[in-house]
Amino acid sequence: MIRSYLNLAEALGESGAESITNLWIHDDELRLLAVAGGSVATTSEHPFWNAGERIWQSAEELDAGDALLANDGKRVVVRGLGASLGTKAAYNLTVANFHTYYVLAGNTPVLVHNTDGCWRGSFDNLPTGKQPHVRTVGSEEELRDVFGQMTNGAEQLPARGPKIPEVYRRADGTVIQWRGASRSGGATIDIFPPNSKGLKVHVEEP
């Protein structure tokens, strides 16, 4: 369960306390992520900060021996992800000014991202484009892979015409759509988080 309101800046350079603006509760399959000194119930897709690799990774992508980041800056060793606990209430937060917060693994707060799934972690790990709200990939095939990661487990919505044939909504309200063509010339992933500026991912121009 989410128990901490502390946050870390996106650049991982500063931390502080911020207000919770939304609490999202939905039913999902949970698993127990074991770390040194405790454990935390999580969805397989929820992103944790891998302090060794310095990337966001979903719980199921973490390996035994990887290190999470505690709120005191120390590393917490991952023991492994256990079997399913069944379908239970899953909690997520929207926090003012940040996309990150800490959850208790035993008695140790560890850093996670505020996505109900891996879309934000996938987005943040991509190279930044010419504008800060844009990320880029090297090919349309890679773009397809990213789209699949971001929409895995999301609710499919009706198409928005021939130019936007695929639209999904995540449990936190984020809408993610595939646009067949854009001003940049190729396919684009449009991301619309609730109460936030839209984001996009497209193939890097040669």
Image: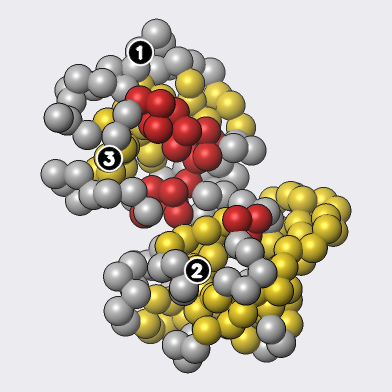
* Residue 96 in picture, x, y percent from top left: 39, 67
Q: Tell me which residue sits at (31%, 22%) in the image.
A: 187
- The three-letter amino acid code for the residue at tag 2 is Asn
Residue indicated by mark 3: 136
Nearer to us: label 1 or label 2: 2
Of the two numbered discs 1 and 2 on the same chain, state the one appearing first in sequence. Answer: 2
Horizontally, residue 30 falls left or right of residue 49, namely right
Quadrant showing the N terminus? bottom right
Where 68 sits versus 123, above or below? below
Residue indicated by mark 1: 163
Horizontally, residue 31 falls left or right of residue 178, namely right
Of the two numbered discs 2 and 3 on the same chain, state the one appearing first in sequence. Answer: 2
Of the two numbered discs 1 and 3 on the same chain, state the one appearing first in sequence. Answer: 3
Q: Secondary structure at mark 1?
A: loop
Q: Nearer the viewer, residue 16 or 201?
A: 201
- The three-letter amino acid code for the residue at tag 1 is Lys
Label 3 Cα neighbours within 10 Å, binned few <14 / some 14-19 / many ≥20: many
- The three-letter amino acid code for the residue at tag 3 is Thr
Q: Tell me which residue sits at (14%, 30%) in the image.
A: 206
Q: Secondary structure at mark 2?
A: strand
Are the residues at dot 1 and dot 2 in contact (C-beta closer than 8 Å)?
A: no
**Distance from Cα at disc 1 to Cα at disc 3:** 20 Å
* Residue 110 in picture, x, y percent from top left: 56, 78
Q: Say whether residue 136 is visible.
A: yes
Q: Quadrant of residue 97?
A: bottom left
**Label disc, if present, on residue 50 of the rendered structure:** 2
* Residue 150 in picture, x, y percent from top left: 50, 40
